[in-house]
């Protein structure tokens, strides 16, 4: 993990759950708000003494749908990939929101009242401005506020190929000749991410290993295009 954030093996929890700081809960599970209108950070679960669980990076399921269609010398194939569920702590999204760099933060004169209870146990009614909402809570508040649902649909692969007919190759040294245009990761839709962030949750912020579900301003996944030529003699 990274500082107090990371993945953990905890009894009665899915293996690899995400842990970190969260918003303090009231006696009935309500979110707790300080007198200044910001959420109160809680770095330890009062019942277990452990770092609180803030998410589960494991998807509910992964679905791949593809097909391969051939007609005469043409060949077309595609593969759609759908990841349902799974959480991700997205620092890129937090930073864009906290620094006011995307469309979700364009109205800077808004005021906000965070849902929860205040120090007196009554519903919070303290207003905070746009900067405090995004900068002090979403960006530098409890880790829990940076966790998003990573459900996404993407066009993983698509290719179009053409094989020249043998009649055109009779007077050439080729027994067969084909050309294929291909593309990978050409389109995606992350349904539960802020639209202005244009954030692709298909990143590995902790590299290859047991760590998953955390992103720390990592480079985005890329589109790739290719052209292949296959020949036999």
Image (spheres, rainbow, N blue to C red):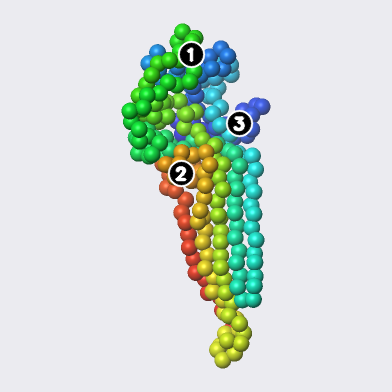
What is the number of the mark on residue 204? none
Above or below 35: residue 67 = below
> Is residue 212 in view?
no
Cα separation, mark 2 vs mark 3, equals 28 Å
Taking the view exactly as shown, the residue that stands out farthest to the right is 12
**Earlier sequence position, callout 2 versus callout 1:** 1
> Mark 3 highlights which residue?
9
Q: Given this view, does label 1 or label 3 mark the residue nearer the observer?
A: 1
Instruction: Tell me the residue at 55%/54% (across/down).
Output: 155
Measured as percent of width and height from the top left, residue 74 is found at: 60, 73
**Earlier sequence position, callout 2 versus callout 3:** 3
Looking at the rendered image, the quarter that the C terminus falls into is bottom right
Label 3 sits on a secondary structure element that is loop
Category of crowding for the residue at label 2, using alpha-carbon neighbours closer than 10 angstroms: few (below 14), some (14–19), many (at least 20): some
Label 1 sits on a secondary structure element that is loop
> Mark 1 highlights which residue?
123
Cα separation, mark 1 vs mark 3, equals 35 Å
**Earlier sequence position, callout 1 versus callout 3:** 3
Q: Is residue 136 left or right of residue 170?
A: left
Label 2 sits on a secondary structure element that is loop
Q: Is residue 69 left or right of residue 108?
A: right
Taking the view exactly as shown, the residue that stands out farthest to the bottom is 171
Q: Given this view, does label 2 or label 3 mark the residue nearer the observer?
A: 2
Q: Image quarter for residue 112?
A: top left
Above or below 148: residue 22 = above
Q: Image quarter for residue 210?
A: top right
> Mark 2 highlights which residue?
199
């Amino acid at each position: 993990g990274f500082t107090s954030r990371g993945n953990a093996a905890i009894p009665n929890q899915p293996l690899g759950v995400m842990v970190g700081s969260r918003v303090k809960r009231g006696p009935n599970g309500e979110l707790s708000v300080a007198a200044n209108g910001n959420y109160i950070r809680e770095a330890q679960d009062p019942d277990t003494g452990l770092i609180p669980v803030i998410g589960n990076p494991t998807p509910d399921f992964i679905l791949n749908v593809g097909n391969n269609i051939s007609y005469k010398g043409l060949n077309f194939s595609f593969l759609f990939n759908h990841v349902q569920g799974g959480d991700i702590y997205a620092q890129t999204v937090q930073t864009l929101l906290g620094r006011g760099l995307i469309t979700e933060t364009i109205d800077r004169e808004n005021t906000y009242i965070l849902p929860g209870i205040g120090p007196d146990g009554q519903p919070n009614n303290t207003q905070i401005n746009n900067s405090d909402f995004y900068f002090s809570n979403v960006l530098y508040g409890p880790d829990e506020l940076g966790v998003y649902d990573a459900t996404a649909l993407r066009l993983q692969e698509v290719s179009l190929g053409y094989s020249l007919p043998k009649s055109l190759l009779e007077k050439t040294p080729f027994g067969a000749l084909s050309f294929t245009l291909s593309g990978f990761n050409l389109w995606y839709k992350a349904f539960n991410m802020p639209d202005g962030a244009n954030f692709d949750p298909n990143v590995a912020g902790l590299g290859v290993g047991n760590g998953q579900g955390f992103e720390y301003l990592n480079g985005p996944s890329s589109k790739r295009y290719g052209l292949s030529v296959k020949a036999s003699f």
